[in-house]
Image: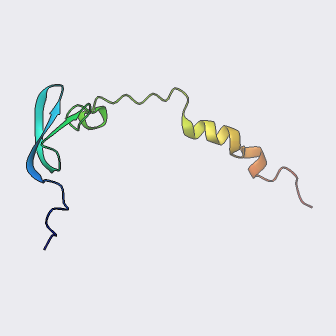
């Protein structure tokens, strides 16, 4: 059993506000939570995320660190 008078007040129906609107209810130690971003307006979850990759990361990595076809074939011929 929990010790009396040492735990914060628990609010099982705490309201979460985003842009002045209630977006969900959760359990919390505060009766109201005000957030800027939640899963309903975050670009990753809404599908509006734009992935900008003008120069491919893999191609850039291979060009910088990868071996070209000449280097990987050995370069020098063995007799």
Q: Residue furthest right?
A: 79
The quadrant of the rendering that contains the N terminus is bottom left
Left/right placement of residue 65 relative to residue 3 reads right
Name the residue at 15% across, 62% down.
Answer: 5
In the rendering, at what x and y percent does residue 8 appear?
18, 55
Q: Position of residue 66 (x, y in %)?
A: 68, 45
The count of marks equals 0
| Protein image colouring | rainbow
Q: Residue at x 31, y 36 (%)?
A: 44
* Quadrant of res 58: top right
x, y percent for residue 67? 72, 46
Quadrant of the image for the C terminus? bottom right
Q: Nearer the viewer, residue 49 or 76?
A: 49
Considering only vertical position in the picture, is 42 above or below 72? above
Residue 12, given in percent of the width and then of the height, sits at 8, 52
Most extreme residue toward the front is 5
Position of 47 relative to 5 (above/below): above
Residue drawn at x 64%, y 42% is 62
- Left or right: where 24 falls relative to 36: left
In the foreground, 32 or 45: 32
Outermost residue to the bottom: 1
- Foreground: 19 or 33? 33
Q: Quadrant of residue 55?
A: top right
């Amino acid at each position: 059993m929990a010790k009396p008078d040492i735990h914060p007040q628990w609010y099982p129906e705490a309201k979460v506000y985003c842009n002045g609107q209630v977006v969900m209810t959760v359990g919390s130690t505060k009766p109201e939570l005000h957030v800027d971003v939640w899963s309903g307006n975050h670009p990753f979850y809404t599908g509006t995320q734009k992935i900008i990759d003008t120069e491919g990361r893999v191609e850039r990595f291979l060009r910088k660190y990868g071996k070209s076809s000449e280097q990987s074939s050995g370069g020098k011929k063995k007799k």
